Image: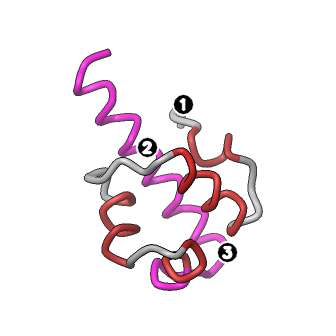
Amino acid sequence: MTNAYLGRRFYMIGKNINELLYKQHKTQVWLAKQCGVTKGHINQIIAGKAHPSVQLLLKISEVLSVSIDKIVDTNS
């Protein structure tokens, strides 16, 4: 896997999280508090600049009440 491929995957994960937040009328601050991380970290994930751990992705899916597939789907 190339860096460009991985970068696109992380960008799409961030985009998916952002869309879920928008649809649920939630903020990055709210998500950060629910997940026990900083708003800056959530912002970096959404921007595709930080790579979330599997544990954090699972926590985000739990907090947003969606399957992990909705977050990691990169076919959009």
First in sequence: mark 1 vs mark 2:
2
Q: Amino acid at mark 3?
A: Gln
Task: Work out whether residue 38 or residue 47 is closer to the camera in this orientation and state it.
Answer: 38
- Callout 1–callout 2 Cβ contact below 8 Å: no
Left or right of 2? Residue 58 is: right
Q: Residue at x 68, y 40 (%)?
A: 69
Cα–Cα gap, marks 2 and 3: 18 Å
Q: Position of residue 10 (x, y in %)?
A: 38, 42
> Measuring 59% from the left and 48% from the top, which residue is drawn there?
71
Residues under numbered marks 1 and 3 in contact, where contact means CB atoms less than 8 Å apart: no
- Vertical side of 13 occupied by 46: above or below: below
Alpha carbons under labels 1 and 3: distance apart? 21 Å
Q: Residues within 10 Å of mark 1 (few under 14, many from 20)?
A: few
Snapshot quadrant of residue 7 = top left
**Quarter of the rendering containing residue 22:** bottom right
SS assignment at label 2: helix
Count of numbered tags: 3
- Image mark for residue 14: none
Q: Which residue is mark 3?
A: 24
Residue that numbered label 1 is attached to: 75
Q: Position of residue 53 (x, y in %)?
A: 46, 48
x and y percentages locating residue 52 in the rendered image: 43, 51
Where disc 1 sits, the SS reads: loop
Mark found first going from the N terminus, 2 or 3: 2
Q: Is residue 45 above or below residue 29?
A: above
Magenta-colored span: 1-30
Q: Amino acid at mark 2?
A: Met
Is 21 on the left-hand or right-hand side of 48?
right
Q: Which residue is mark 2?
A: 12
Instruction: Say if the magenta span includes residue 57.
Output: no
Q: Amino acid at mark 1?
A: Asn
